[in-house]
Amino acid sequence: GKRKFSLRIYIVYFMTQQQSTQKSQDPEIYIATQGLVKVASAPFEEEASSSSSSSSDDPLREPHSVEDMYMTNSGREVEMEQHDLSYLAKVMKDQGDSFDDLWFNIIQSAQIVMQKYHADVSIQQEQDPTILDYRTKLGRLGLPKVLGLDFLVDAECRPWLLEVNRFPGMEPRDDSDTHVKTTVMRHAWNLAEQRLQRKPLDLSRTIPPSCLHRISSLHDTSFD
């Protein structure tokens, strides 16, 4: 049967020194084309028949019970399958769906999230000068910040944002996510190094073509 799945999309964010002193300056934000497809270990048709035999309010419930087997966004689900976005693109193509349309909508969602974040940061800096000092130091150091955006995809292949993880676990849990996570981190740190050295961004000279694509200006984001 069909299985539920969720997407983990990675955002790499750099605090620019200009952003620390000028509210109108856009943060430097990249979306990673390497992401995770988390597929539940059990078909979702089992949910109805299993719900009666599992008590959600039982404090002694097994940590990896049947309820967790259709969850893809929980640390309790240890048997779920994980794939990269290339796998999802192939599956969608085989089913006659457009991965490009899905990806376009994901980018729009990421832009809206980061636009809201940027606005909140500007307000916080006005209210608390110590935050401005802290962010100025971050901009000077040029350290990359990785965020994890979790999406569900509905029957019409539209992504729905579930949550934003400020501290996504980037340590691989097994072979299924090692390539994705190490690629995102390697490219993020390579980009950070080149930014600090003020060199042209030619990542292909040292590593494979970058999986990080810069998101366009947040001020151009449309909510329509």
Image (cartoon, rainbow, N blue to C red):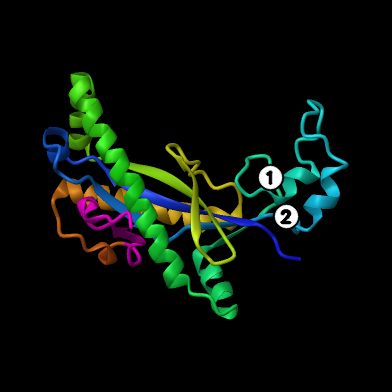
| Nearer the observer, 3 or 145 | 3
Residue at 32%, 52% (x, y): give it.
Answer: 111
User: Label 1 is placed on what type of residue?
Assistant: Glu
User: Which disc is residue 134 wearing?
Assistant: none
For the N terminus, the image quarter is: bottom right
Q: Position of residue 196 (x, y in %)?
A: 18, 45
Q: Which residues are magenta?
A: 207-224
Q: Is residue 215 above or below residue 13?
A: below
Residue on which the image places disc 1: 77
Residue at 26%, 40% (x, y): give it.
Answer: 118
> Which secondary structure is most common in the magenta stretch?
loop
Dot 1, crowdedness within 10 Å: few (<14), some or many (≥20)?
many
- Helix, strand or loop at mark 2: loop
Q: Is residue 137 magenta?
A: no
Q: Position of residue 3 (x, y in %)?
A: 69, 60
Q: In the rendered image, is residue 185 in sight?
A: no
Residue on which the image places disc 2: 41
User: In the shown orientation, is residue 19 left or right of residue 204?
Assistant: left
Q: Is residue 208 above or below residue 193?
A: below
Whether pointer 2 and pointer 1 mark residues with C-beta atoms closer than 8 Å, the reply is yes
